[in-house]
Amino acid sequence: MPVLSLPTLSLSRLAALAFVSAVLGASAAQVDVAGVKLNDTLDLRGSTLQLNGAGVRYKLIVKVYTAGLYLQGKAATPEAVLAASGPKRLQITMLRDIDGNELGKLFTRGMQDNASREEFAKSIPGTIKMGEIFATRRKLTAGESFAVDYVPGTGTVISVNGKTAAEPIKEPEFFSALMHIWLGKSPADAQLKDALLGRAPNSGGPTSIN
């Protein structure tokens, strides 16, 4: 019987193929949170961020959204998250439909609950702009997503479904106040706070909220 000969690959080509395979494998690494796929890493304005933690926001027994926190390096406390240099991202994907205006009001209340009157006053311009972003959307439906990016020298950038929703919010106090919704002393969901800080998986069930 004739012997079929396969083309011979050089060592350099084999090495190149192995490298490409490794890169593709690394880029495909994901975490599944309530059916939502979150990449282990992402690129933000030329900086590579890694997933610090992710979990589910519950309201009583209802899953509201997933949240993933991305930083340049791991952080296990709220203070370390806010003190970390470089870009940061909070990625949220809705698990149920919610009125956009209602969501904006909930975020505003969460900021007020975790800041002194003086601290909240410094973030009011950004809070108003954030409220306007969500007020223009009648509804955020399950599967839709938005991201809150902090970019040094630029400010806080809010994007909805991958599209920038407004001009950057330049006040640095705004991003800190916004992050306290999830990482403050009175977080929206205590289990989600722990999950975002990488302390424990947020898969056991809902927590009691205000």
Image (cartoon, grey):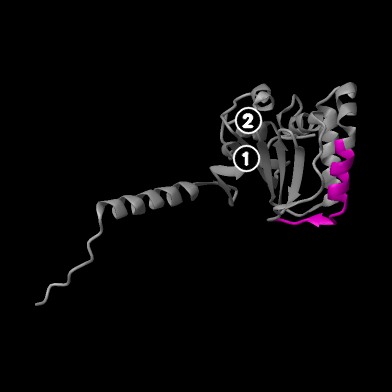
Q: Nearer the viewer, residue 39 or 156?
A: 156
Badge 1 vs badge 2, beta-carbon distance below 8 Å: yes
Q: Where is residue 85 in the image (x, y as percent from the top left)?
A: 65, 27
Would residue 81 be found to the left or right of residue 158 on screen? Answer: left
Q: In which quarter of the image is the C terminus?
A: top right
- The amino acid marked with disc number 1 is Gly
Few, some or many residues within 10 Å of mark 1 (<14, 14–19, 20+): many
Gap between marks 1 and 2, in whole Å?
9 Å
Q: Which of 145 and 123 is in front in this view?
A: 123
Q: Where is residue 82 in the image (x, y as percent from the top left)?
A: 69, 26
The span picked out in magenta is 126-142
Taking the magenta stretch, the answer to whether it contains residue 138 is yes
- Judging from the image, what secondary structure is the residue with disc 2 in? helix
- The amino acid marked with disc number 2 is Asp
**Residue at x-position 89% and y-position 36%:** 125
Name the mark on residue 55. 1
**Residue at x-position 56% and y-position 31%:** 200
Residue 208: quadrant of the picture? top right
Name the mark on residue 194. 2
Q: Which of 165 and 180 is in front in this view?
A: 165
Residue 7: quadrant of the picture? bottom left
Few, some or many residues within 10 Å of mark 2 (<14, 14–19, 20+): many
